[in-house]
């Protein structure tokens, strides 16, 4: 049976194709028609897995990788092998998170709810390939559209995971939804992070992530010694907030059914006291926001108050990923709600699942 035309084409390479490092994200599709895994051998066999462009308009990861490789690793041996996963080159061509006919790549990994089998079967195969390489850690690089500080997100609370995260930023988010993310699926097996590197195109985001990858390549191991409580400020995602799709919304002084504050994204990573105003409601008969907890329950009433024509939070929360980008809001969400947690009391004592034994290679190392 031939592959469906909708099936993404997965490519594996053991080298960087000529000219690839000269390509901006928008041009990668000319070399890489679909999701691609590039395995570069380094002095230490066990690789660092780095994922970029799962969202086609989030270009910082690719910029960091290509600058890293061009800086000196075109000539010098990598200190450790590197597995580079390049995600959605077709959406990158259009400078979009994803194309309309595509699912969100970062919801298609094992453990997710995505129903498009053409994608989930390919992503399961790619995931199996990752595991066969027994990565030391998995780092998935993203951007966001609002004003957010750089931060790392983990899906398990363990010293080694928090240590790796704290090397990037002291603010660390812990989340268990959405399901089907790369970081979540890999975190069963190895320290696994999602890096949020601010907005795409910012030089300091590329600088920061490139320096971080360089540090990670030089790690010999990731210690399980407890992390200092001052080194990590850990926040737990408690709900996802979407805008009621039956309502017209806008930002600032606009005649829409819900008008959110201009500069709402200034609330990102601020601990907002109860009663902080988010916007005004001009159509009273339905809730403008829907908050859903990590078990999928509607918890809107726990977090929001819509009385007196205003949107306010009912208890102290810290939003993250608040965006003013309508397309992101409609395709994904308005924001996540976070609450501070004390990881000293929450650290997992479970072990991670063993990775498969290394697959013997037919070619000689070198
Ligand atoms: Zn992303």
Image (cartoon, helix red, strand yellow):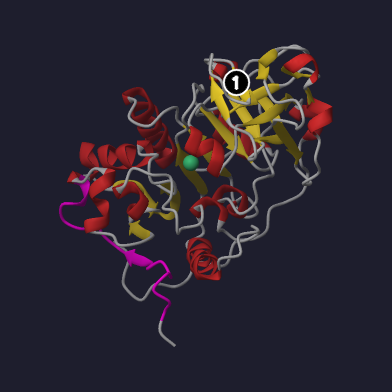
Question: Residue drawn 55% across and 40% down?
Answer: 330
Q: Nearer the viewer, residue 169 or 329?
A: 329
Question: What's drawn in magenta, residue-wise?
Answer: 3-21
Label 1: element kind: strand
Q: Main secondary structure of the magenta part?
A: loop
Quadrant of the rendered structure where residue 197 is?
top left
**Badge 1 is on which residue?**
259
Horizontal and vertical percent position of residue 202: 34, 25
Q: Quadrant of the C terminus?
A: bottom left
- 276, above or below 215, in the image: above
Would residue 279 appear left or right of 90 to someone viewing this image? right
Please check the rendered image and state whether residue 13 is part of the magenta-colored stretch, yes or no. Answer: yes
In this rendered view, identify the residue nearer to me: 49 or 61: 61
Q: Quadrant of the N terminus?
A: bottom left
Asked whether 198 or 225 is in front, the reply is 198
Q: Is residue 43 visible?
A: no
Measured from the top left, where is residue 212 in percent x and y? 42, 32
From the viewer's perspective, is residue 252 above or below residue 64?
above
Q: Which residue is situated farthest in the bottom direction here?
A: 1
């Amino acid at each position: 049976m031939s592959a469906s035309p909708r099936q993404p084409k997965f490519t594996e390479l053991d080298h960087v194709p000529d000219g690839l490092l000269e390509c901006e994200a928008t041009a990668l599709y000319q070399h890489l028609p679909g999701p691609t895994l590039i395995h570069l051998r380094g002095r230490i066999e066990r690789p660092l897995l780095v994922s970029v462009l799962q969202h086609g308009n989030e270009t910082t990861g690719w910029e960091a990788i290509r600058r890293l490789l061009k800086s000196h690793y075109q000539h010098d041996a990598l200190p450790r092998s590197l597995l580079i996963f390049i995600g959605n080159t077709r959406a990158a061509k259009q400078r979009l998170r994803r194309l309309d006919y595509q699912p969100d790549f970062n919801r298609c990994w094992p453990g997710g709810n995505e129903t498009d089998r053409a994608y989930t079967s390919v992503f399961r195969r790619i995931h199996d390939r990752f595991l066969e390489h027994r990565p030391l850690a998995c780092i998935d690089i993203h951007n966001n559209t609002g004003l957010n500080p750089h931060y790392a997100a983990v899906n398990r609370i363990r010293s080694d995971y928090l240590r790796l995260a704290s090397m990037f930023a002291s603010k660390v988010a812990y989340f268990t939804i959405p399901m089907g993310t790369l970081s979540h699926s890999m975190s069963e097996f190895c320290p696994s992070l999602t890096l949020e590197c601010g907005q795409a195109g910012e030089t300091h985001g590329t600088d920061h992530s490139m320096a971080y990858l360089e540090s990670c390549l030089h790690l010999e191991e990731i210690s399980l010694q407890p992390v200092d409580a001052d080194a990590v400020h850990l926040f737990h995602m408690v709900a996802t907030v979407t805008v009621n799709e039956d309502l017209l919304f806008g930002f600032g002084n606009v005649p829409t059914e819900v008008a959110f504050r201009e500069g709402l994204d200034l609330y990102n990573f601020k601990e907002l006291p109860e009663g902080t105003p988010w916007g005004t409601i001009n159509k009273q008969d339905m809730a403008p926001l829907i908050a859903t907890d990590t078990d999928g329950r509607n918890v809107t009433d726990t977090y929001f108050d819509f009385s007196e024509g205003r949107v306010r939070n009912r208890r102290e929360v810290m939003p993250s990923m608040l965006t003013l980008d309508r397309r992101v809001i409609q395709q994904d969400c308005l924001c996540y709600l976070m609450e501070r947690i004390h990881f000293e009391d929450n650290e997992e004592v479970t072990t991670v699942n063993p990775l498969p034994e290394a697959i013997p290679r037919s070619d000689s190392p070198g």
